[in-house]
Image (cartoon, rainbow, N blue to C red):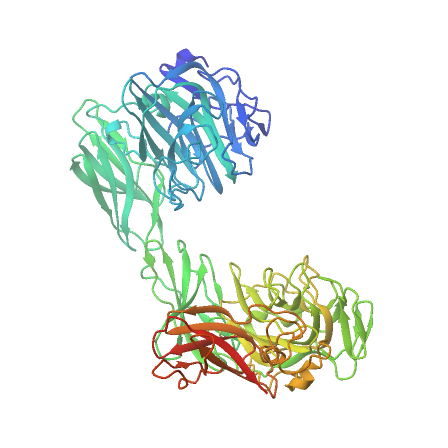
Amino acid sequence: MTPALHGSLLVQELFDDISAGDASLDGAGDTTSSVGLTDTWAVNQNTGIFTANNFNVVGATLPGLPPDDGLPGGVWNNTNSWDTNIYATRPLATPIDFGADQVIYFSVRLNNPGDTAMGIGLATGGGPADEFVGAGFSWNNASMVGLSDLGAGNSAYIAHGTLDGSTESGVYGIRALEGKNTVNGYGLLVGRITSHASGEDLIEIKRFAENSVIPGDLAAVTWSASYAVDTSMVATRLLMWMNGQGSGELDAIRFGETWTDVTGVEPAGPEQPSLTGSTLVSATGTTAEASVSLITSPAEVTLYWDIVDQGEGAWANANALGAQPVGTVTGSMTGLMPDTVYFYRFHAVNPAPEPDLEAWSEPAQSFASALTGLAVDDLIVSPYSPYEVDLIWTDIFETETGFTIQRSPAGAGTWTTVGTAPSESSFFTDKLSGLTPDTSYDYRIFASNAAGDSDFSNVASGTTPSAESLETQLLIHFDGTLSGTEYTLGPDEIDLSGTFQASGAPVVDGGVAVINAGNENGSDGFDIDGSFFGDLTTQNWVVEALLTYQSTGTGYAPVVLDVQGDCNLRLRTDDNDDVLQMFYWDGSSGHQQLTALPPSGVKVHLAYAWDASSSTLTGYINGVPFGSLAGGHFTTPDPTTISFGYFGRAGYEGRGVDGTLDEIAFQTGSAAFDPASDFLLPVPESEDFATWIGGFEVGGMTGFDDDPDGDGLSNGLEGFFGTDPGSRNSGAVRQVATDGTITTFVHPLANPPLSDVAGGYEWSMDLENWYAGDGVDGPPDGPTVSIPNVGGGPGEVGVTATSSEPVDHLFLRVSVSQ
């Protein structure tokens, strides 16, 4: 194709057959359909801007000129990078002078799915100091130049600056935009550049979506964005850019002197009607209303509709709207059937000229009528467990977008939405929504689409089964024998799944299993096949371990217990060595409960229990709860494992505890777990100070007031806190906050508490005179401070000190006695 055939077309790059297959754009060019270009493309920074000869950017039906001149070809994103230095340029055959009075139009076909950005423009060269103007589509998350609110994602935008790679001035810098989240797919981007010999120049862009109509009257164009610049640059290169993660595409770049050059649409004459922007206004099950913009000329308008898209042919239904002035035209469609897809199209005719002039609105416009009057009539309810109810029905609909499931206590008529199901569904399980055992419920459902809801279904009822007592699934005292990974049960040991086995190389001897001795994050531990028990998110369960750990390691946090891959107890977090962490993942976010870590070298009972009725996970240290998590059900990325002493999730095996396991247990059922009576393993009993201090290597400094580690905390305080008297502890009293009247702080607390150690709190205003925090003691005519004693809970406890009047200075300390 020669330039002479294009009239006032200045530049054209269709990428027709530009490569034999997938290949970098760098060095490509010399296609038969190129106009106004010389040499080849030069890619900057990343050669992942790829070409291919097996596609065009067409979408469903993008308007405008064809994407090729007979041979397919386009550019696609293979950069896998958000590097803002990625762009490409190709020399122009004739420079374009922005210092002259002129109007230039441009168009490009774009597709920005996933998280991609792309665009085109004109530049003075191909280096970082060269100036450019251009336009494109933005990433999912993007900000305008000078802002940081991510309000410019997925939008058509205008860029101007230099090719320096900066998000403020480079090609990915957004100067003006159409609006956030207006495009994440196909679009035809058309622009107009009005330059002046003196004064500001203006860049305007308009994005046309699939199946849209390009008006012939430029006065009818509502520009998507505009931006004023003042440049006298002389463009010598065609510019394009593309980056991100996703299969972005770009095709058919055109610059010309007229609207027709870049869109193919001839200017409308003064008597030529034009229709654009047809939109559904409302719809019910039997009627609908649509509108369209009539521009250029008044006309006789008719609204057509049918269950088949008839194009410009014969439609089954019509509403003659009569003579309409230029402006918005609205028409109604009647006689519709519910739950049916209808196509519609406006037609305008100006009968005055000879011959008559006509126009059609956008093709392929459709909607679904509402579901009113229709309803599921065969809903069946089948209780599966005390915390699960299955619902079954026949999907009688054609256009539903989903179903809503509602529940009420039987006969109460107080309906609550408990879930949704996607279109074409016929089954739903109500679980993790607060069901209780031995309770009768009513259910109903309805379907929805954009136009409205169906009627309610029949009401179906069911009663959840009674709760079953917790059953011992696993109880191991390590009285059996271990050969390799095969464990043979000892007397009174239980393994109902028949899958209990070892991981790594633990040593079982004398009723104790030694795991990962001196080996941080080792793979020693034990596990059972969790899939044997079915869906554990809908059952109550409790998992226990009686263990002694020696260290928390320095790599990944050691995992004490794990249920199916993402629900576990861990020794410490990644950034805090002094906490016990209970954690689970709900599929989109993590839930975490922290408490003070029990001392190393001391036998401790650790457990956590799941309550399916409330979707709550509760952790225990020595039988005392330390917190609960209620963030929805936990995920089960590896349903085949429940692991003890290490992380047994497939692909992550390891992260084991350096220590010993005395006993482990696992129970399931539907009855509520009672920590006062339902633990299978013995909870360590409380000990006195003398016994406790004898368990630490502190030499002869075993007295209540001694401080063998020199950290300022006496042995008595360490016993009260539950910290190690032979290892320096810092910051025992932490997170202090005050407003002058209310002061709060936290500190560790032994669990179980020592039987002969009592703790309390004292306060002072000058560090010389100390008073009891009983709300009575204090200086003459001065304030009093009430600091209630705390106790009974493990790990960190919160304390609140309340002054009878505001004070400028308040000092607090913990006091202990034996």
Q: Quadrant of residue 489?
A: bottom right
Please tell me which residue lies in front, 29 or 605: 605
Q: Residue furthest front?
A: 768
x%, y% of residue 688? Answer: 65, 87
Please tell me which residue lies in front, 70 or 170: 170
Count of all numbered marks drawn on residues in the image: 0
User: Residue at point 57% right, 66% down?
Assistant: 583
Please tell me which residue lies in front, 740 or 650: 740
Q: Is residue 140 above or below residue 443?
A: above
In the shown orientation, is residue 740 left or right of residue 287? right
Quadrant of the snapshot with the C terminus: bottom right
x%, y% of residue 708? Answer: 67, 75
Q: Residue furthest right?
A: 483
Q: Quadrant of residue 200?
A: top left
In the shown orientation, is residue 479 left or right of residue 606? right
Q: Is residue 771 above or below residue 320?
A: below
Does residue 616 appear anywhere in the picture?
A: no
Q: Is residue 256 above or below residue 507?
A: above
In the shown orientation, is residue 817 left or right of residue 643? left
User: Residue at point 17% right, 36% down?
Assistant: 324
Q: Residue furthest top?
A: 4
User: Residue at point 53% right, 60% down?
Assistant: 587
x%, y% of residue 262? Answer: 37, 24
x%, y% of residue 156? Answer: 38, 36
